[in-house]
Image: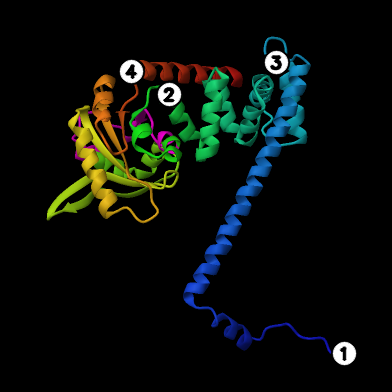
């Protein structure tokens, strides 16, 4: 029996290619690229998990044999030399072996949830968490956010420097519980912070609101990271119209978690009660003219340089639209900057000593 020949002649190949429209081809390419990217991410996560498991086991061996930095320096140096000879390029420097022991000592007493979080984080993230933070509660907060938000090590470092954990413990001020449906209140609370860190703007002198807004748009990727989960940028100075009059929202977003438009108004000074009524007006216009069918009521966030909590609370009591009020911070406090510099100098000195 003659075998069927599946080799394509140029003519046959050309005819198959021409059966795909340009849109179909682009869609095919998009799907293939998405599959490749997701597979690469999956492989990278499995590899990272295996590496963390290996580092955990090495740290456990060192810990159980009570190898400490006071008496075990010679052992670690010898281990490092022998392991690097047999397994070059695997990160078995003396400092890294100590880090592996610290990794086990730090997290072996932690709860299972935290152990699962650090198991999927890259090694550099874990070293940062161990060296910068002291409590499991803080580490859990940053580890969870890093996994959920996909933070790089540098982004994680900036959030730690900005004390995002400490800011998260501050009072959130909003009226969501009184004006939103029960099933939406919790999601709305989660997308609001008590304070926002805008230090990534690098502002060193007083600026006008429009100047800060322009800088935020230029660095929109950093702003979205700071805002949190689910935000998509729609535009700044978003135009609204009513009876021939124009009104402009400073910045407009859509949040996938709440399925609602989120209007942000930026104020360079202290909070004033009239900001609430103005925001309520904007939200009414958004719901009337911009909100699509199936979307939840629009939410407003007023960002101020400072606020009086009692004043905000009273102002929100009269608002019928969902509004939150938060502070923003443009620079790190002076004391924190000094502390960060001292820590960096200390770390550099430790590295120099290790090399000696």
Q: How far apart, in angstroms, are the residues tagged by discs 4 and 1?
A: 86 Å
Q: Between residue 195 and residue 126, name the one nearer to us.
A: 195
Which circle, 4 or 3, is nearer the viewer?
4
**Disc 3 to disc 2, how far (Cα)?**
34 Å
Give the mark, 4 or 3, whose residue is nearer the N terminus: 3
Q: Dot 1: what SS?
A: loop
The residue wearing badge 1 is 1
Between disc 4 and disc 1, the foreground one is 1
Q: Which residue is mark 2?
A: 163
| Residue 244 can be seen in this image | yes
Identity of the residue drawn at 51% across and 20% down = 347
Between 292 and 122, the one lying in front of the other is 292
Q: Quick one: SS at disc 4?
A: helix
Earlier residue among tags 4 and 1: 1
Q: CA distance from mark 4 to mark 2?
A: 14 Å
Badges 4 and 2: C-beta atoms under 8 Å apart? no
Residue that carries the numbered disc 3 in the rendered image? 73
- Image position of 128 (left or right of 292): right
Q: CA distance from mark 4 to mark 3?
A: 38 Å
Give the mark toward the camera: 4 or 2. 2
- Residue pushed farthest top? 70
Magenta-colored span:
187-212
Magenta stretch: includes residue 151: no
Which one is closest to the eye, mark 3 or mark 1?
1
Q: Position of residue 288 (x, y in %)?
A: 26, 52
Q: CA distance from mark 2 to mark 1?
A: 76 Å
Asked if disc 4 and disc 1 are in contact, CB closer than 8 Å, the reply is no
Q: Position of residue 201 (x, y in %)?
A: 31, 35
Mark 4 — residue?
A: 334
Q: For this view, does 161 lie left or right of residue 95?
A: left
Question: What residue lies at 29% left-to-right and 21% top-to-bottom?
Answer: 309
Q: Alpha-carbon neighbours of circle 2 within 10 Å: few (<14), some, or many (≥20)?
A: some
């Amino acid at each position: 029996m003659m075998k069927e020949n599946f080799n394509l002649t140029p003519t046959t190949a050309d005819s198959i290619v021409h059966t795909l429209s340009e849109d179909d081809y682009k869609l095919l390419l998009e799907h293939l690229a998405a599959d490749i990217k997701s597979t690469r991410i999956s492989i990278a996560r499995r590899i990272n998990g295996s590496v963390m498991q290996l580092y955990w086991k090495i740290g456990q061996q060192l810990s159980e044999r009570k190898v400490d930095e006071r008496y075990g320096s010679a052992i670690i140096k010898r281990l490092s030399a022998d392991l690097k000879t047999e397994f070059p390029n695997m990160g078995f420097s003396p400092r890294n072996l100590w880090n592996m022991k610290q990794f086990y000592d730090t997290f072996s007493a932690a709860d299972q949830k935290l152990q699962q979080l650090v198991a999927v984080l890259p090694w550099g993230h874990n070293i940062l968490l161990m060296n910068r933070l002291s409590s499991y509660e803080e580490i859990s907060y940053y580890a969870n956010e890093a996994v959920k938000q996909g933070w790089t090590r540098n982004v994680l470092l900036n959030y730690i420097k900005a004390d995002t954990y400490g800011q998260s413990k501050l009072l959130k001020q909003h009226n969501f519980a009184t004006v939103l449906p029960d099933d939406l209140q919790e999601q709305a609370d989660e997308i609001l912070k008590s304070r926002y860190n805008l230090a990534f703007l690098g502002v060193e002198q007083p600026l006008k609101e429009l100047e800060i807004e322009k800088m935020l748009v230029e660095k929109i990727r950093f702003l979205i990271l700071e805002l949190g989960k689910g935000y998509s940028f729609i535009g700044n100075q978003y135009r609204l119209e009513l009876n021939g009059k124009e009104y402009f929202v400073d910045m407009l977003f859509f949040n996938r978690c709440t399925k609602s438009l989120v209007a942000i108004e930026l104020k360079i000074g202290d909070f004033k009660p009239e900001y609430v009524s103005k925001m309520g007006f904007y939200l009414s216009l958004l719901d009337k003219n911009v909100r699509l069918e199936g979307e939840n009521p629009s939410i407003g966030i007023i960002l101020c340089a400072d606020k009086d909590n009692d004043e905000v609370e009273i102002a929100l009591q009269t608002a019928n639209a969902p509004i939150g009020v938060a502070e923003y911070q443009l620079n790190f406090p002076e004391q924190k900057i000094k502390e960060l510099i001292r820590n960096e100098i200390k770390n550099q000195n430790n590295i120099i000593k290790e090399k000696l």
